[in-house]
Image (cartoon, rainbow, N blue to C red):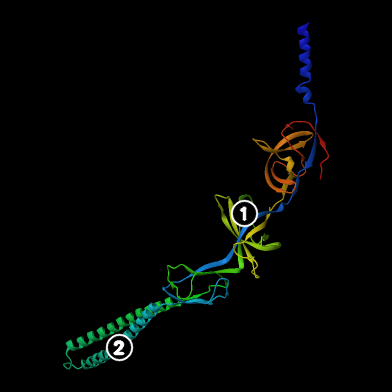
Amino acid sequence: MRRGALVVVVTILWLNGPLADAQVTTAVETAKVVSKALDKTITIPGDLTPYQGVNLSARVGGFVEAVTVDRGSWVKRGQVLARISAPELRAQRAEAEAKVQAIRAQEAEAEAKTVAAQSTFARLKAASATPGVVAGNDLEIAERGLEAARAHVNALKGSGTAAQAAVKAVAEMEAYLQLVAPFDGVITERTVHPGSLVGPSTGALLRIEQVARLRLTVPVPESYVGVINKGTVVQFRVTAFPDQTFEGVIARPAHSLDMKTRSMLVELDVNNPKQSLAPGMFAEVQWPVSRSQSSLFVPRTAVVRTSERQFVVRVRNGVAEWVDVRRGELNGDVIEVFGDLRQGDDIVRRGNDEIRPGTKVSVAPAKS
């Protein structure tokens, strides 16, 4: 009797086990997969730098004679900023010019001798037409003398050209005795005063920066590199003016990622006619993120992540199935996904891995 009772109990338990569970229907709330264009902005930190900035140094040794600007001075291109006095350079130029004059005097004397030798040779050659009047040796000597005179003139001309080049080189060096502004800008640093001894090894005497136009450098993360479009207008803010919005234009992507940060530096051109912005400012850039084609979006809660996979639970004909997806960009309460999905598919709004593939589900109306 006891063995018979045991068989009955096991049979009852088996009937209420997996076979019974397979008939259970799980009620779920669903949402539709939506296709739309990705259009959002993210905040990326950026740095403002001058469009151009150079250090002005002394190319020749000397004493600072005058400095016509100071830190904060606005200057125009070609404006004289400082003058250097170099007595040694003046002496070199005087010596070079004196050498040119001496060579010219020697050249004039040699040319006169050449003319005389030419005349002598011409007379002897004419006389040699009459046999016995001029010895052949005398005519040959006269010809050799003329050639030597011409060679001497040519040599002096070469020396004169070299001497003139030396004068020009000194004159070019003297041009560096004046420091001039290479472009319109503002003096941001000054390290010398009149009377200072300066030279090529002194370092920067002045620094000038162009601030009417700035560069905004933004490190764009790798995931957004594919949507960098030149010419796009981008807005940003700075701490100094929290109630104002400024604009820059995407101009120069680096086309190379930093291996440490996995980001690409992108430069934007920023017009700054009122000079309200300054190099060195920190900017909060509202970087636009978009794609050339529409993307599929699902509720953020629909994506399930486990240690092995990432998926959404799709409902077809009242049966649940797992569809592997890759996450894209968040856009409010929805997230961009990539996988074997189609627009209009029904998915479980609050997905979880307890809804196993093949589970029968009853679909609640999808919320918009």
Please tell me whether residue 42 is drawn above or below residue 366 in the rendered image: below
Amino acid at circle 2? Glu
Residue 117 is left or right of residue 224, and the answer is: left
Among the two numbered marks 1 and 2 on one chain, the one whose residue lies closer to the N terminus = 2
Residue 178 is left or right of residue 216, and the answer is: left
Residue at the outermost right position: 365
Residue 94 place in picture, x, y as percent: 37, 82
> Circle 2 is placed at which residue position?
111
Q: Nearer the viewer, residue 225 or 80?
A: 80
Residue 164 place in picture, x, y as percent: 37, 81
Q: Quadrant of residue 127?
A: bottom left
Residue 213 place in picture, x, y as percent: 61, 68
Binning the other alpha carbons within 10 Å of mark 1 as few (below 14), some (14 to 19) or many (20 upward) gives many
Residue 148 is left or right of residue 38, and the answer is: left
Residue 106 is marked as none
Please tell me whether residue 272 is drawn above or below residue 94 in the rendered image: above
Q: Quadrant of residue 106?
A: bottom left
Q: Residue at x 58, y 66 (%)?
A: 51
Q: Nearer the viewer, residue 64 or 249?
A: 64
Amino acid at circle 1? Val
Residue 220 is marked as 1
Q: Residue at x 74, y 40 (%)?
A: 302
Please tell me whether residue 210 is drawn above or below residue 95 in the rendered image: above
- Spatial CA distance of label 1 from label 2 is 74 Å
Determine the secondary structure under disc 1. strand
